[in-house]
Image (spheres, helix red, strand yellow):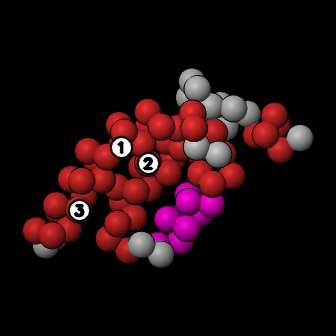
Amino acid sequence: MRSSHKILSAIGVLAAPLAFSLLPVVVPQVAVVLAVILASGFFGVFAAPLLLIAVLAVAAAAGLIGGGTSFATTLF
């Protein structure tokens, strides 16, 4: 792994707590779209740390983690 990839991964891991604290503000549909884009591999090397954030965002949006809203409430 290149050193630049290690640096970017470290930034992603450090950014995860910040992203997690902002999750109650995140619109659930945006979190799902982000997860789908990241899962498709669009961001390449960025996918690993960002996918963690996206998974947390989707879990919070689905109400699996405190502070999220359920999809049923959001969609209907």
Q: Mark 3 and mark 1 in contact (Cβ < 8 Å)?
A: no
Q: Is residue 32 left or right of residue 43?
A: right
Q: Which stretch appears magenta?
A: 32-41
Q: Which mark is residue 8?
A: 3
What distance separates the C-alpha of mark 2 from that of mark 3? 14 Å
What distance separates the C-alpha of mark 2 from that of mark 1? 6 Å
Q: Position of residue 42 (x, y in %)?
A: 47, 75
Q: Which mark is residue 53?
A: 2
Residue closer to the observer: 41 or 25: 25
The furthest residue to the front:
25
Query: Which three-letter amino acid code belongs to the residue tagged 3?
Result: Leu
In the rendered image, residue 37 lying in the magenta stretch gets the answer: yes
Q: Which mark is residue 54?
A: none
Q: Is residue 3 above or below residue 61?
A: below
Query: Residue at coordinates 31% horizontally, 46% vertically from top-left?
Result: 15
Q: Earlier in the sequence, mark 1 or mark 3?
A: 3
The furthest residue to the right:
76
Question: In the structure shown, which secondary structural element does the residue marked by tag 3 occupy?
Answer: helix
Q: Is residue 17 left or right of residue 23?
A: left
Q: Position of residue 22 (x, y in %)?
A: 48, 37
Question: In the structure shown, which secondary structural element does the residue marked by tag 2 occupy?
Answer: helix
Q: Which mark is residue 16?
A: 1
Question: In the structure shown, which secondary structural element does the residue marked by tag 1 occupy?
Answer: helix
The quarter of the picture where residue 34 lies is bottom right
Q: Is residue 32 above or below residue 76?
A: below
Query: Residue at coordinates 50% horizontally, 51% vertically from top-left?
Result: 54
Q: Earlier in the sequence, mark 2 or mark 1?
A: 1
Q: Position of residue 50 (x, y in %)?
A: 40, 56
The C terminus - image quarter = top right
Q: Position of residue 3 (x, y in %)?
A: 10, 68
Query: Residue at coordinates 39% horizontally, 64% vertically from top-left?
Result: 47
